Structures are given as structure tokens and as C-alpha cells.
Image (cartoon, rainbow, N blue to C red):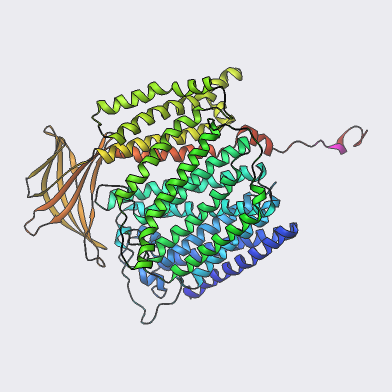
Amino acid sequence: MTSALGQGFVLLGLIAAGFGAAFGYIAGVKRSAAGLRLTRRLALLFAVAMVGASAVMWYALLSHDFSVSYVAQVGSLATPLHITIFSLWSSLEGSILFWGLILGLYIAAAATFQRRGHEDYLAYTLATLLGIGAFFTFLIASVADPFAPTAPPVPVDGPGPNPLLQNHLLMAIHPPMLYLGYVGMSVPFAMAVAALLRGQLGATWLRPMRRWLLVPTSFLTAGIMLGGWWSYEVLGWGGYWAWDPVENASFLPWLTGIAALHSGIVQQRRGTLKAWTVILIMITFLLTILGTFLTRSGVVNSVHSFTQSPIGPVFLGFLGLCAAAVVVLLALRIDTLVSEPSNERLVSREGAFLLNNLLFVSLMFTVLVGTIYPIVAESLRGVKVSVGEPYFNRMAVPLFAGLLLLMGVGPALPWGGSDPKLVRRALVRPLPAAAVGLAVALLLGARSAPVLIVSAFAGFALWVTADQGLRPIRARPRRQGGRGPLAAVLVAPDRLGAYVVHLGVLITFVAVAVSSTFQREAESTLRAGDTLRLGGYEMTFRGAERVQEPHLIRHQAEVEVSTNGRSRGVLYPSLNIYPNQREPIGTPAVRTSAGHDLYLTLMNVGSDGSIGLRAITTPLVAWIWIGVVVMVLGTALCLIPTAAERRATTPRAVPDLAASPAGGGR
């Protein structure tokens, strides 16, 4: 019964998406208001179907209905309630269903909120989104069917979800954030397709597109950060980013999405970089499909990826079809991508934006080549090739440094170029801040060139960010008769938000450079009463215990931490053993402060009660997460409508002519 109901909702979604896509394109060609209304209703029906299918699966998981194949695969009577809830996205078939749910919600949002003033684009937009929805519901109904009945005999219990997904609460947050980012890129892609089909790429399209691009970019930013935090808190290696193929898969669309946002700013302000904006949006969507293929096809070996499955070739075919459609559409509409004539100079703010985009795209290709080269080499030559961290660091770090420098140089330059003396003055004024950043790094003991360069560039960019970001707040009170800073924020929240995002990027850049350079570690075998020393810390092993829980066995060590003979508390690193996992999974214990983290990993527990303990001290790790939070908050500011946009959307009062003394006319 449960299987049939879930499959019924999926079939309803497939029908709604298929017919909705067809009617939407017809309505777009004929500019039919009735066709648009029908397309919108089918879009909402698709969303209802995806919500219904997901609700049925959650019911099956919570009721432990092992007659449903997906529940038999990931369910368990011993699994805690909260883990059971997010086990929906813990395996391949459920993750595709969850993708369909998020896509349905995005389509419903586009159909509901993208209405007045955008009727010319909306039919094509919804048609494209529903076409994507048709593909994913086809997957759910065929090769990735989570509702397939379990082959008899129906088990009375299941193995539970992947132990790595049970080991930290972050897995309840990290995947949904990534999905909201990945799936959300479908909306600006659909809007770009609609604008090309309509042949209109002006402000009417650009303003809403930029907002729809900001939303998934913000979610993707948060998702990448939460993934790094999960890796840091769960895997026990003391790091947060290893250039893993699946990590790279989420990073690629983030890079091009950020580049597209910058291009959109220049297009909105100067009418240039129109082709850059459209092409980057389309590449971003294609990269989300590529990332989904890498994660779910089993072609890469990663702790984050799913196992080998028949979904890979289908996804690869869909990626090829989308890429071919994008190339054909761009070729047919190449005339609409011509920017407005201008006399721009290279040494200008828009010139810096162009160079910024070139660096972003170069960084994307660098990461893309390092990620897919081993796959291509193995498929063509049958040879396993590994592209590891040294390649990415050697190739990507200079590009990151260039982006950091441009964060300071770009906003300091005027739009359209200017007098060379004014340009030189704008670039010379932040130099003392760069010198201060360099001096601070030297005083703190930094000697490596990357850290010194990042410190100097960060000081330069921080001065420019503060100067440019605070200018409206400083100026508005004088211009508006004493109104406070809040008035300035409400007039142009997107400007302030952009510089808040830059501030978050600066914080994260510096924290990554320092934490990756000054990490220290020590490892030893300890018996009760023994002490391990590292960086002023004394870690005394007090004893170990075995804790039995319904879904795991935990071996836990008690380690007292002190500095200069003064106790700083007790940490409990542990090893967790799950019924369906041969090797124990470590859960490190982390003591976080503003300056650094103390990170303890339990390597093993001996039969004689001794333990293997690894201790790591890493500076400024917490500031990586703080910087990303600042980025997300800045993005939220950018989503607040400006004063001009609020005036444009406020309905004007229409006089009641029938009630006038003249009887409605003169």
C-alpha cells in the first residue's frame, strides 16, 4: 500500500512535469495568457506531488515499513528518531527523491512569486524548470525508485543508514543546504533560457535573475562550510578541506555562480558583460548536474559519494543533452548577447570585474581538470591516476591570491575609468593597511610566503572594504537631515551587503591561510595517568569506558586538559562501532577558542586499557566558520529590496473618478 501510494505521487509528478513543460513552451511561443495559467497550475501540481511522495517516504521510514525497499535498505528499529528523519537523503534513491522535493518547492516559488511584470519570461521559465523536473521524476520512477516493494521475505529489521551519517548532527543540516544550493541553480538557468528564447536580456530579466541566483549561492556557501565542518568534526584527521572529488563538485558551481553575480552587477550598472552573465549561469547549472553525476554514479572514490549504480549513464546522458541544448541556444541567440557600446577602460572597476571573472573561470577549470582527469585516464587507458592536494595547492593558491588582491583593487577603482592621478591615489591610500597586515603576520611568527602575501593583500582589501562599505552610512545623515545609519542601509542594502560578503571572504581567507600553515600535532600511546604535551597543553589520560547504545557501541576516553598546571576541563574523544561497519569510526573531541582549537582523536583502545591519542592544535579554525556566516548574512542584506525597487513595486493610488464632483470627467 505504501509503495503504491508513493509511486502514484511520483507518476502524478511526472505527468504534471511532462505536460507542463510542453504547454509552457507552447504558451511562450504563442504568448498565451491561458497557456501560462495552465502551466502555472501544472507547476504547482508537480510541487504537490513531490511533497506528497516525500511525505509518504517519511511515513514509511518512521513507521519502519520494511516492505518498502528504501526503508529495508537504510531503516533500523534501533536508529534514533532524528537520524531516521534525515535518513531520507542518506542513500542514492532517497537523495534523488529529496532532490525532487526541493525542485518542486523552487518551482512552486517561481510560479507564485515571479508573476507581475515577468509574464513574457515566466512561461518559458516554468517550462524549462518542469522539463528538469520531468527528468528527475523519471529517475525516481525508474532506475532510482525508492518505493519499489522489497523482495520477499520482508525483513523484520534493517541495517540503518551509513554510520558516517549517524556520527554527527551536522548531517541533518549539511545535505539540505547543498541541495538547496544545487537545485536552486535551476531557476536562474531557466530564466536565462527564457530570456534567450524571448530575445530580451535587459533590466526586466536581470533584476529578478540576480535575486534568484543569490539565494542558491547563499545556500551553497553555507552547505560547503557545513561540509567542511562535518569533515573536521567527524573524520578525525584534523582538517576541513582535502580537495576530495565530491568536495570539488560542490565548489565548482559556487565559483561560476559567484562570477555570474559579479557579471550581473556590471551588466546592471554599465550594460556590459551580458554574454558573461548568461554563459556563466548556464555553466553553473551544468556543473551542478556534473557534480550530481560524480556523487551518485560511483565513478569517484570518496567518503562523501554513493556506491556504483545504474543512475550514472542516465545522468551523463542528461548532462550531454543539456550541454548540447545550451550550445545550440547560444548559437541561435548570439545576437542578443552583444553588450551596449561603451568606452570602458581596462583600469576601471568594470575592468577589474572582468579580470575577476577570468580568475574565477581559471580556478574553476583548474579544479575541474584535477577532479575529472583521473576518471578520464582510467576510462581511456585503464590506469588509475591520483591527483592530490599538491596539484590543487600549487595551481589554485596563486589564483586565490589574485582574487584576494582584486577584492581590494576593484572596489577602489572608479566606474568607467578616470584621471590616472585619481586612480593612483585610490590605489595608494590602502597601502599602509597592507603594510600593517604584513607587519602583524611577521610579529605573530609568519615566515611562509603564502601567509605573508595573504596578510598584505587582506590588509589592503580590508581597508577598501571598510571605506567603500561605510560610505553610504557616513553620507546619508548629512544628505537626509540627520537620518541615522538604518536609513542608509534601507536605501541601498545590496551595496552594504556586498561589502559584508567581502568582509566574510577576507576573514575566511586569512583563517584558512593561518590554520593550514601553523598546525601542530603530537601522538602517543598512553596508560592511565600518562600525559601528552603539545603547545603548552598537558593532556592527562584518566581512563576509558565502554558505552552501549541501541545503535552503536562507544569506546570513550577521559582526557583532562590543563595549561601551566591549571585545569581547562575534560575532553572525551571516542571510537564508535556500528553493527553494519567493520571498522570503528572516530569521533574527535574539540576544544574551540577564538585563537585556536585543541583537537583530540582516539586512535585505538588496547586490551590492557591503554589508548593511542593524537593531539592537534590549529589556529583560527573557528574564524573559517565565522567568515562564512558573515558571507551568508551579507547575502541576506543583498536580498532586501532597495528604496528604488520598493518605489517601483508600490502600486500607485488611482483616483476614484466616479466619486469626483465632476462625475468622472471635465
Q: Is residue 657 magenta?
A: yes
Indicate the quadrant where residue 659 lies.
top right
Magenta span: chief secondary structure: loop
At x 74%, y 56%, the residue is 31
At x 63%, y 32%, the residue is 343
Indicate the quadrant where residue 459 lies.
top left
Q: Foreground: 8 or 340?
A: 340
Q: Position of residue 91 (x, y in %)?
A: 39, 64
Q: Foreground: 13 or 397?
A: 397
Q: Position of residue 161 (x, y in %)?
A: 34, 64
At x 63%, y 47%, the residue is 337
Q: Residue reaching furthest bottom? A: 152
Q: Foreground: 109 or 583?
A: 583
Judge whether 482 appears above or below 283 on screen: above
At x 53%, y 67%, the residue is 137
Is 373 situated left or right of 559 in this image?
right
Q: Is residue 92 magenta?
A: no
Is 420 situated left or right of 235 in this image?
right
Q: Residue reaching furthest right? A: 666
Quadrant into which the C terminus falls: top right
Extent of the magenta region: 654-658
